[in-house]
Amino acid sequence: MTSPLVLIARALDPALRLWQRRTGLGGMAAFFLLPNMAVFGVFVIVPLVLNFAYSLTGGAEILLGDRRFVGPEQYGRLLECQNYLVPLTCREDQFWNAVQNTAIFVTFQVSLMVTVAMITALILNRAIPGRAFFRAVFFFPVLLSPVVVGLIWRWILQREGLLNLIVTSLGGDPVVWLNDRFFAFAAAIGVSTWAHMGFFTLILLAGLQAIPKDLYEAAEMDATPPARVFWRITLPLLGPNLAVVLVLALIRGIQIFDEAYVLTGGGPGTATMFITQYIYEVGFASILRNPGLAAAASILMGAVLVVLTLVQLGLSKRAERARER
Amino acid sequence: MKKIWLGASILALIAGTASAQQTEVRVMWYSDGVEGEVIADLLSRFEAANPDIDVVLDNVAYQVIQEQLPVQLASGSGPDIARVTNLKAQAEHWLDLRPYVADAAYWDTNFGDRFDWMRPDGSTAIPGFMTQLTLVGGFANATLFEQAGVALPGPTATWDEWIEASRQVMVSQGLPAAFAIDRSGHRISGPNASFGANYIGADGLPAPVDEGTMAFIGRLVDWTAQGLMLPETWVSAAGTTYRAAADDFANAQIPFYYSGSWQVANLSTKIGDAFDWVATGSPCGTAGCSGLAGGAALVAVRYTQHPEAVARVMDYLASEPVVREFTERTLFLPAHAGIVAAGGLNFQSADPNVPPALSRFVEASGETLPAADALPAWRWANTYYGALVTRVSQVMAGELTLEQARELIDRDIADQVAAAR
C-alpha cells in the first residue's frame, strides 16, 4: 500500500517541477523556507513591527487602534536627561536607574561568568576522576527554569532561609540579605552566573577539545611551563570561542529578568531593577502602566542587542574561518 | 456488532446535542482565603438546578486579575463574570445587568449603595455586586503583648502609641520587627486620611500630595529606618508590586499588623490556636482614626455572548440565602443591605478570635473619614496608590528624600492623568 506521504509528494510533484523550472534552485530554497519564515514572521516580525508602532503612540488605552499617534515623543521622554549618570535628573528616572543597574550588572556578571566558565572548562578538560559526573553537575542548573532558580535562592537567602540557619547556628544574628543593596545586587550576579555558567562552560570545553593535542605534546617536550602553555597555546586557540561566549554572555546579561525578578523583585528600592523588569513593570504589571513608553524602552534595548548580535555573528564567522584554516 | 455501533452512535449524538444546548459561563475568580472553595460549592448547586448552564470557575492568582484581565478586557474578550477589586477604573467594561436580572429593584435595594464604585459617573447601570465589603485595619498578637507585659493600646490610641507599644513587645520578645503594613498604596491611604490627607482636588482630579499624606509617610519612613517596620514588605521590592505581611504575623514575627478585614479567615486558618489575636481598628492620627473601605465585586463582563445566562448566575449568587451562606462561610463582611439590616449572621468558625474581630471591623467601619470614604468611587484612586507605593519604597531604600518623593508622586500621577486625556 502506498503511504499517504508518497501520494502527497506525487500530487505536488508537477507543480514543484514547474516552480523549479521557472525560479531555479533559489526559488526551490525559498519554497522550502516558506513555512519556517511564516512562523518566524507571525511570532517575531509582526510583534516587532507592532512593538515599534506602539512606541509611537501615547495614552492609557491598551489596544493599538485606540491609541493616539505621538511620533517619537516616548523616545524623547526616555532620553530627556540633564545628566545621564544621575537618574534623578532624567524625565524617566526609573528607566535610567534600570540602565545603570544593567550596565553594572553586565560588567560584573559577564566578567565573573567568563572567568568561572573558563576555569571550570579547563578543569573539566583534564583527566580528573568523575569527569563525566562533574560535567553533568555543572550543566544541571542550565536545565532549571529561571523561576525555579530564583525561588531556590530566595529560600536560601530569606530571613528564615538556609544561610541564616547556618549563621545563627554559628552564633550570629540573622541578616535580611536581600534587603541590603550591595548583597542583593551581588546575589543577582552570583545566582545568574550559577544558573547559566554550565552553558558557557560547554562551549569553552568544546573549544578546548578542538585544540590539536600535538601542540601540547610539543610544549611538554620543550618543558614549557603550564602558565606559558595556557597563555601561548590555549588562550589564542580558544580566542574565537571565548569571543562568542563573551558576546552571548553580554546579550544574556542585558536581558536579565526572570531569576533576578523572582529573587529580589527589583529591590531593595530599585537597586536590582534591570531594563527588562522596567519594561515589564511599565508595560504590564504596574498600576501606572504606559505601553508606549515600555515599547520605546524595549526598542532602545533591542537596538543595543542587535549591535551585539551582529558582533557575535561576525565573531562566529571569524571562528569558522579560523577552524577552516 | 452493527447494533452496538448504532447504539453508541445514538448515545454520542444525544450527548453531543445535550452539551450543545448547554451555555458555558466562565467565571474568573481569585481568593484571599477559603472563598474559592465556597463559591465552587455554591456554583455546583446552581449547575445541578440549572442543567442548561455550565459554569466554569477559573481560579486564578490575584496578579492575573490585576495584570492579565485588563488586557483581555481591552481587546474585547475575557471571562463572562470576574471577581475584581479595581472596579471604577475598568467600569466601561462591565455589562449593565439591569435589562437581564429578574428583579432590578432587589439589586437596587440591597446593593445600590455601592454601584457607583463600579460604574461610570452618572450611570444607572447594575454592573454586579460586592461579594464582600472590606475595611482596612489592624491586628495585634494579644499573646505576645501579654508575654511582654505591655498593655494593648485602647481604641483611641494614636499611631505613635501603637508603634511604641509594639516596639516594646519587639524588644521584650526578641522579634525581628514591631509591625508591618501590606505593601500597597491602598493600605496607607486610610492612615493618611487620619492625618488630614485629601487626594481629591476641587475639580475631581488628583490633588498634589498634601501635608496630611506627608505626615504619615514621613512616620512610615522613620519607623522603617529605625528597624520597627518589617523591611521585607516595603523595601525589598520595586514598582507597585503588592506584598502582604500576613504570614509574618501568623508566624508571630511581628506583634502588630495593619492590613484589613479580608485577612480574618486567612489568619484564623493559619494561626489556629497558636496564639490569641485581636482586630484593633485603625490607630488615630491628628484628624481621626480612619481605615479605608473597599472590597471585591463580582461583575458581569460586557463582552459576554450570553448575557441572559450570566444574569441568571448573578441572580443566584446575589440572592439573599446565597450571599448569607457565602458570608457566613468566608467570614467576610457582607455588602447586602438586607442581610446587614437583618443581622443574626452565624459565622462558621470555631475560632474564638473571629467573632470579636469581625465585630471590631464592623464598629470601625463607622469611624472612617469622608476623605477616605470618597476614594473607592474615585477614578484616580489606584493611580494615587500606585505612585505612593513606588516612591515611598524608594525613600525607605534611601534612594530618594521625602521631598523628592513628593515631587515624583505628583509627576507620576500627572503623567497618568495626561495619558488618559
Image (cartoon, rainbow, N blue to C red):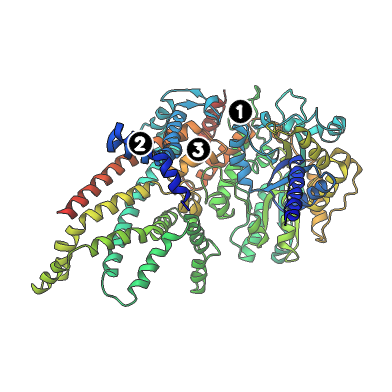
Labels 2 and 1 in the same subunit: no
Provide the residue designation for mark 1.
Answer: B207
Determine the residue located farthest toward the front in the rendered image: A1
Q: Earlier in the sequence, mark 2 or mark 3?
A: 2
Q: Considering the numbered disc 2 on the image, is that residue within a helix, a strand or a loop?
A: loop
Query: How far apart are the alpha carbons under marks 2 and 3?
Result: 20 Å
Viewer-nearest residue: B259 or B141:
B259
* Quarter assignment of residue B350: bottom right
Can you tell which of label 2 and label 3 is closer to the viewer? 3
Residue type at mark 3? Val
Provide the residue designation for mark 2.
Answer: A84
Q: Considering the numbered disc 3 on the image, is that residue within a helix, a strand or a loop?
A: helix
**Who's the residue at 67% across and 42% down the image?**
B191
Q: Label 2: chain?
A: A
Note whether B174 is above or below A94 in the view shown.
below
Callout 2 touching callout 1 (CB < 8 Å): no
**Who's the residue at 68% across and 60% down the image?**
B250
- x and y percent of residue A222 in the render? 8, 72
Residue type at mark 1? Ala
Q: Residues within 10 Å of mark 3 (few under 14, many from 20)?
A: many
Provide the residue designation for mark 3.
Answer: A282
Q: Residues within 10 Å of mark 1 (few under 14, many from 20)?
A: some
Q: Is B281 on the left or on the right of B182, as rendered?
A: right
Question: Residue B278: in sight, yes or no?
Answer: yes
